Image (cartoon, grey):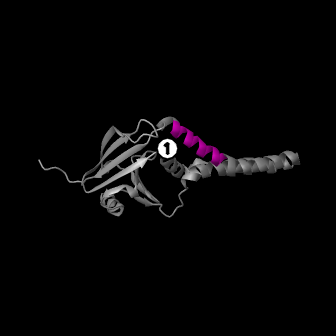
């Protein structure tokens, strides 16, 4: 039997910061909608309350604006980071993606702690191209979605065979929906830590 040939290969290192970047990207729309609704409810209540009690009305207006525009987005980002720490622990992850003609073979490895560089195999997955929901390009990352909420994260700089452009063309040729968000700004790692 003839062995299948690896067309492209990528090795992407991950930790909780990269995963937080993805989740903040994925939750951006939800965060904006929540902030707008929160602000509108309090501002509307504040305007109505101004006719009854001016001090209470102004207080509601200020709370709505500060809470919706500053506090709520900050708390949502912090919640995502905290959840990642709980879920992932203090580990570093290494995902190897091998792109074949009919499927992607993904190998996941992890370290016992954040300081270690000893990666040990955790799982493998054979992913057929028709199982891929969509692909999103976001700055130096390619998100290969399995469904609306779950994706593999491929770092452009991790290509060891071929280029990321060739990978994108392969995925497009398989009829997978491709969304290019590469012009959107990516928060720096320092911004993610805040």
Magenta segment, principal secondary structure?
Answer: helix
Q: Which residue is located at x 43 percent, y 45 percent?
A: 150
**Taking 80 as reference, is 165 above or below it?**
below
Residue 59 percent across, percent down from the top left: 82, 47
Q: Which residue is mark 1?
A: 16
Q: What is the secondary structure assignment of the residue under circle 1?
A: helix
Residue 71 percent across, percent down from the top left: 68, 47
Q: Which residue is located at x 33 percent, y 38 percent?
A: 123
Q: Which residue is located at x 51 percent, y 40 percent?
A: 84
Q: Which residues are magenta?
A: 72-85
Neighbourhood count class around disc 1 (C-alpha, 10 Å): few under 14, some 14–19, many 20 upward: many
Residue 124 percent across, percent down from the top left: 31, 40
User: Looking at the image, how many numbered discs can be counted on the residues?
Assistant: 1
Q: Of 129 and 81, which appears nearest the observer?
A: 81
Q: Quadrant of residue 188?
A: bottom right
Does residue 85 appear left or right of residue 66 in this picture? left
Q: Of 111 and 45, which appears nearest the observer?
A: 111
Residue 133 percent across, percent down from the top left: 38, 50
- Whether residue 4 is visible: yes
Q: Quadrant of residue 159?
A: bottom left
- Whether residue 152 is visible: no
Does residue 68 appear left or right of residue 47 in this picture? left
Q: Of 115 and 70, which appears nearest the observer?
A: 115
**Taking 109 as reference, is 158 above or below it?**
below
Does residue 180 appear left or right of residue 32 in this picture? left
Residue 9 belongs to the span the image colors magenta: no
């Amino acid at each position: 039997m003839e062995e299948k040939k690896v067309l492209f290969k990528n090795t992407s290192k991950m930790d909780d910061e990269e995963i937080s970047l993805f989740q903040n990207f994925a939750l951006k729309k939800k965060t904006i909608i929540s902030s707008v609704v929160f602000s509108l409810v309090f501002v509307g209540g504040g305007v109505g309350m101004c006719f009854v009690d001016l001090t209470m009305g102004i207080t509601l207006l200020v709370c709505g604006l500060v809470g919706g525009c500053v506090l709520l987005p900050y708390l949502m980002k912090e919640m995502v980071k905290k959840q990642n720490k709980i879920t992932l622990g203090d580990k570093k992850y290494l995902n190897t993606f091998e792109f074949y003609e009919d499927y992607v073979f993904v190998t996941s490895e992890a370290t016992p702690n954040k300081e270690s560089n000893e990666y040990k195999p955790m799982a493998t997955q054979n992913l057929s191209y028709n199982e891929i929901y969509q692909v999103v390009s976001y700055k130096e990352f390619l998100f290969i979605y399995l469904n609306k909420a779950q994706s593999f994260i491929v770092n452009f700089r991790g290509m060891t065979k071929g280029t990321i452009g060739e990978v994108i063309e392969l995925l497009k040729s398989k009829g997978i929906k491709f969304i290019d968000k590469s012009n959107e700004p990516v928060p720096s790692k320092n911004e993610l830590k805040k």
